[in-house]
Image: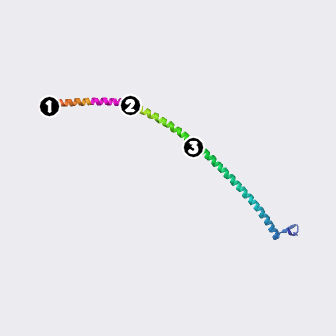
Amino acid sequence: MVRNLEASGTKNVMSLDNEDKAWINTQLDSRLGSLEATIDSKIERLEATIDSKIERLEATIDSKMERMEASFSGKMERMEASFSGRMERMETVLLTEFHKWASPNEARLRTHSAILRAVDLELESVSNRVSKLEDQQQ
């Protein structure tokens, strides 16, 4: 296919005609097409591999998140139960101590109230007597 060889001195010069150029272009286009198809195929396989790895990673993350949520929920429930128990014991102790303090004070208050009523009765009695004496003197 190579034509028109000319020798000029020690150098050989080769020229290509349009038919040779067309044949070379056809060969290059064919080779580029097959390389492009190979690259496209490899890119598609790579995309599929990446997609499957992303899906597995998402599944792994979802699984771990669910386990963490379950663990967290369990710990929260145990903390709430412990806290509720402690609060109940503290309330009981507080109410018991208040009752211990209030009972004697209430008894003292009743005693003082009874004494004040007795004093009021005495005062009223004395007041009545004074009033009778004043009436008699007039």
Q: Which sits in the foreground, 129 or 88?
A: 88
13 vs 33, nearest the viewer: 33
Residue under label 3: 69
SS assignment for the magenta stretch, majority: helix
Q: Amino acid at mark 1?
A: Glu
Q: Three-letter amino acid code at disc 3?
A: Glu
Left or right placement of residue 51 versus residue 121 in this view:
right
Q: Quadrant of the C terminus?
A: top left
Instruction: Give the x, y percent position of residue 43.
Output: 71, 56
Spatial CA span between label 2 and label 3? 47 Å
Asked whether the residues under the numbered discs 3 and 1 touch, taking CB atoms below 8 Å apart as contact, a structural biologist would say no
Q: Is residue 74 magenta?
A: no
* Residue 29 position by quadrant: bottom right
Disc 1 secondary structure class: helix
Distance, label 3 to label 1, CA atoms, is 91 Å
Disc 3 is placed on an element classified as: helix
Which labelled disc corresponds to residue 134? 1
**The quadrant where residue 17 appears:** bottom right
Q: Which residues are magenta?
A: 102-116
Q: Residues within 10 Å of mark 2 (few under 14, many from 20)?
A: few
Task: Identify the residue shown where x is 51% and y is 39%.
Answer: 80
Q: Position of residue 31 (x, y in %)?
A: 78, 62
Tag 2's secondary structure? helix
- Earlier sequence position, callout 2 versus callout 1: 2
Disc 2 marks a residue whose amino acid type is: Trp
Q: Position of residue 58 (x, y in %)?
A: 63, 49
Q: Earlier in the sequence, mark 2 or mark 3?
A: 3
* Quarter of the figure that contains the N terminus: bottom right
Q: Residue furthest left?
A: 138
Residue identified by numbered label 2: 101
Q: Earlier in the sequence, mark 3 or mark 1?
A: 3
